[in-house]
Image (cartoon, helix red, strand yellow):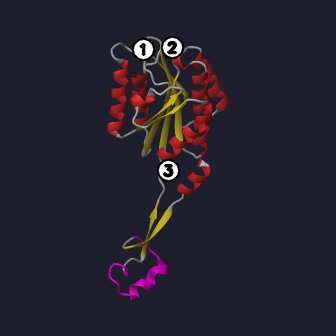
Amino acid sequence: KLQRLFKIRAKSIYIYGQKRGKLHAKNLYRTALNIQGYSDRIFKKRIVSTIQDTAVCVLLDCSGSMSGDKFEHGGTALLLLSELLQSIQIQHELLGFTDWRHCVHYVFKPFGVQSDISRIRKYLKYASTGMSMNADGDSILWAANRLRARTEKLKIMIVLSDGQPAGGKGGDIDKFTRNVVKDIERDKTVDVYGIGIMDRNVHRIYKECRSILKSSELEDALLDVIQSKVL
């Protein structure tokens, strides 16, 4: 469904009846009508699609609270998003995070590299053996800064998490996470979207979010975020 929609939206279109632009021969008859505000609208203007001028970062919570079904759903979401974004030629990277008394960050697939599903599965399996705490705020900031360095016009970060921050370097990590997200939302350089994996905590943290409480909801949630943010 999204591939079909993307092909339509990705095409450049012309808007007709403009006062300036490229001459539209079929509208030349208007000059003879001498109607104010109508006779001079003999041009067309090309609108170039910017859909492909997009960079997407997908950040997966790899903490202990995400183990079991949550991590399976999160990993599936990561793989589905990668396949979808690659199929519609949108630059993206896949990241993960946990905390072993210090932030541990994974780059499952960097920008500019073709998505290799078997390799990503291998990295996910490795990440599943070291699931500990989750310093969401630090990791979201890390991912956002990577995304800000991109040259694309539209920058989108999708965070897949059960949404309950824990760990970090001390202090109120939950408040810190909320402040980091608020700063990103206020800055507007990066669009951030939270997807809660079998948990509704994301609704406390992100303005734009959705919860997946069962596996059957996963595909619709991913389609929703890509359609609303990218297309």
In the image, which disc is placed on residue 132? Answer: 2
Q: Give how far across and how far down residue 98 sits, in percent.
A: 49, 18
Identify the residue at horizontal 51%, vertical 60% (top origin): 12
Mark before the other along the chain sequence, 3 or 1: 3
**Residue 129 appearing in the image:** yes
Image-based side of 4 in relation to 26, left or right: right
Q: Which residue is mark 3?
A: 51
Q: Which residue is mark 1?
A: 167
Residue 125's quadrant in the figure?
top right
Tag 1: residue type? Gly
Identify the residue at horizontal 51%, vertical 41% (top origin): 225
Whether residue 83 is situated above or below residue 165 in the rendered picture:
below
Residue range corresponding to the magenta coloring: 21-39
Mark before the other along the chain sequence, 2 or 3: 3
Q: Could you tell me which secondary element the residue under label 1 belongs to?
A: loop
Distance between mark 3 and mark 1 Cα atoms: 37 Å
**Residue 149 appearing in the image:** no
Tag 3: residue type? Ile
Mark before the other along the chain sequence, 1 or 2: 2
- The residue carrying pointer 3 sits among few (fewer than 14), some (14 to 19) or many (20 or more) residues within 10 Å by Cα, namely some
Q: Give how far across and how far down residue 152 sits, in percent.
A: 44, 44
Q: Give how far across and how far down residue 55 sits, in percent.
A: 48, 41
Image-based side of 161 in relation to 186, left or right: right
